[in-house]
Image: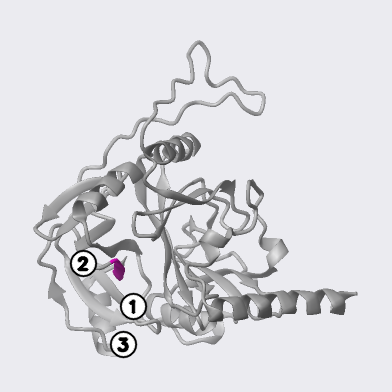
Amino acid sequence: MNEISLSEPITRAKDLAYVRMQAPDLAIGETFIEDFGLIVSARTADAIYARGTDSPHHVYILHQGEPACRSIAFHMQSLDDLNKLHHEAGATAIEELDEPGGGHVVRLTDPLGFTVEAIFGMEELEPIDAGKALPLNIDGQRNRVGRFADVKRGASTVKRIGHLVLECKQVEATYLWYWKHFGILRTDKVVQPSGADGMQFARLDKGLEYTDHHTIAFQYCIDGTERLQHVSFEVQNFDDVMIGHDHLLEAKRYKPVWGIGRHRLGGQIYDYWKDPWGRIHEHWADSDLLNVEYQATVQELDGARDYWGANQQPTMAYAIQNWSFTTVFNLLRIVAGAVKAKLTKG
């Protein structure tokens, strides 16, 4: 569907801001935060706030509580955007955030039941210098001479929050809600063999300015449970993805999910891991960048196959969070659709 045929969105989000997660043990959670390459910027009695090397005060909040995603948040352009969401979309009244980083917020509930925070005025900190990327001797050019690679071991260094993926039963309806409220543009859609929606990638509307291939995506939930599927963070460069992978492996506390590889839809060099409570977190570097001139596409599963990687399609650990009768039923339905589509094509 072409967004030109729809009414104007209520607002256009400036950026993804953060996720609020919960964990029963903040000490274990803080160890994961540091092993993953986030930087603690503040603590309260029942929460940890973590940043990247960019200036926002935090991009990740971990509250004390049962394992869950409490909310997701977008940075908005102005207080006027918050007023529009309150008056035109039924968001809560504007309030001042009484927590580290501050700012003002309104809250909405999306079709999945998630709390979505729209914020303006978060404190900005001094950016952290992560150092320059290693010059590479590639394409016949000698950019690094007289020096060794000297890549330091350790955790990745997170730059910023990049995107998140929501699992949902109704991909199209969920996408349209986010478009209406935050002006999120279609990028690429992946369809199941039957033609039903599999995944919709969507990006910020920054006009002619280039932005990530996707800031939010909506994935069909095979097990029937609507949830945050994963949250994703940009790290400094390809080497940073690789050393982070080794660091998490050596820690022997976390489960790898999918990677390392390079996505075709989005272009990122990626690496997915589960935290101690099974929530998927992604490191990536080198995203495709698009602006409003990009025309959205519809891809079959094979068209979405990664450029390279050990698993060029999503692994079971990535695609399925819980096994149940619903999971098996939906998998059989997808397989049947693939067989039918193959027979139809002859």
Tag 1 or tag 3, which sits nearer the N-term?
3
- Dot in front, 2 or 3: 2
Residue 315, compared with residue 81, is above or below; it is above
Task: Judge from the rendering whether residue 250 lies leftward or rightward of residue 116; answer left or right.
Answer: right
The amino acid beneath tag 1 is Phe
- Give the spatial CA distance, label 2 vs label 3: 30 Å
Label 3 Cα crowd, 10 Å radius (few <14 / some 14-19 / many 20+): few
Badge 2 crowding class, 10 Å Cα cut-off, few under 14, some 14 to 19, many 20 or more, is some
Upstream in sequence: badge 2 or badge 3: 2
Residue on which disc 2 sits: 65
In this rendering, the label closer to the viewer, 3 or 1: 1
Horizontal side of residue 284 vs 97, given as left or right: right
The residue that label 1 is drawn on is 114
Q: Which residues are magenta?
A: 67-72
The secondary structure that most of the magenta stretch takes on is strand
Q: Secondary structure at mark 2?
A: loop
Q: Quadrant of residue 71?
A: bottom left
Considering every residue shown, the one lying at the far right of the view is: 346
Q: Of circles 1 and 2, which is in front?
A: 2
Circle 2: residue type: Gly
Number of numbered discs on residues: 3
Residue 89 is labelled as 3
Q: Residue 167, how many percent across, how many down?
A: 47, 73
* Residue 43: % across, % down: 13, 53
User: Is 326 displayed left or right of 195 in the figure?
Assistant: left
Q: Give the residue displayed 55% in from the left and 80% down from the top.
A: 325
Query: Does the magenta-highlighted stretch encompass residue 30?
Result: no
Q: Earlier in the sequence, mark 1 or mark 2?
A: 2
Q: In this orientation, which residue lies closer to the viewer: 50 or 13?
A: 50
Q: Amino acid at mark 3?
A: Ala
